[in-house]
Image: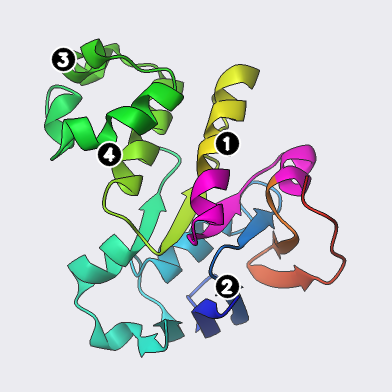
Amino acid sequence: MPAVLQVRDLRTSILKRVSFTLSAAECIAVKGPSGAGKTLLLRAIADLDPNQGVVTLDGRDRSTIAAPEWRRLVGYVPAEPGWWAETVGEHFREWQAASACLRKLGFSEETRTWPITRMSTGERLRLALVRALMVRPKVLLLDEPTAALDAASEAAVESLISSRIQAGVAVLWVTHDEAQAKRIARRRLVVEAGRVCQETDQWPAT
């Protein structure tokens, strides 16, 4: 598959130079200890923090794309998603369009009226993922999207993202779980003390 995202000499005050490509319909797992810079890498690609280097999407330089459009095309789902309204439904422009994804992750029609304050961390993560998918990004940057989930919910999230990858979405997925990394990705980036290395060993995706 062609490279959809190209990163060249990307760096911040903490993150050392990193270069890699991510193809359409590919998932790369991002591994490393807490505090190593995994979140910084995603935020730099999303252009949410000051950074230098070249990032292109389908050959278009990030600097030529308006920030709101870039963040739609390159969707970032943080470990602690933001919420700005009182109820779940207010965060979705088209609730019916999202309903199929919501059902796959265990949510019902009643979820629309839930106050944000009643949701667990895991529920917030799953809803934020659906919210990101609804704008049809070409690239998804996921920061431990299953960290607070039970086994069933984790499997549902992996299945949903796998279906989007098969449809052509490119995914950069931060995970601490070695078994999950092997399930979701054929390649991985390892982040340690701000340095990013690509692992050359590949394994069959399951």
Single out the mark in the foreground, 3 or 2: 2
The percent position of residue 140, horizontal first and vertical second, equals 45, 56
Q: Is residue 51 left or right of residue 160?
A: left
Q: Amino acid at mark 4?
A: Gly
Q: CA distance from mark 1 to mark 2?
A: 19 Å
Q: Earlier in the sequence, mark 3 or mark 1?
A: 3
Residue 14 in the image: state x and y as whole percent.
53, 70
Q: Find residue 36 and report its horizontal and vertical position in percent.
A: 64, 56
Disc 2 residue type (three-letter): Ser
Residue that carries the numbered disc 3 in the rendered image: 113
Q: Is residue 84 visible?
A: no
**What residue is disc 2 on?**
23
Rate crowding at label 3 as few (under 14), some (14 to 19) or many (20 or more) other CA atoms within 10 Å: few
Q: What numbered label is drawn on residue 82?
A: 4
- Magenta stretch encompasses residue 37: no
Element carrying mark 1: helix
The residue stretch that appears in magenta: 162-183
Mark 4 to mark 1: distance in Å? Answer: 24 Å
Q: Residue at x 58, y 52 (%)?
A: 173
User: In the rendered image, which residue does mark 1 sit on?
Assistant: 159
Q: Amino acid at mark 1?
A: Ser
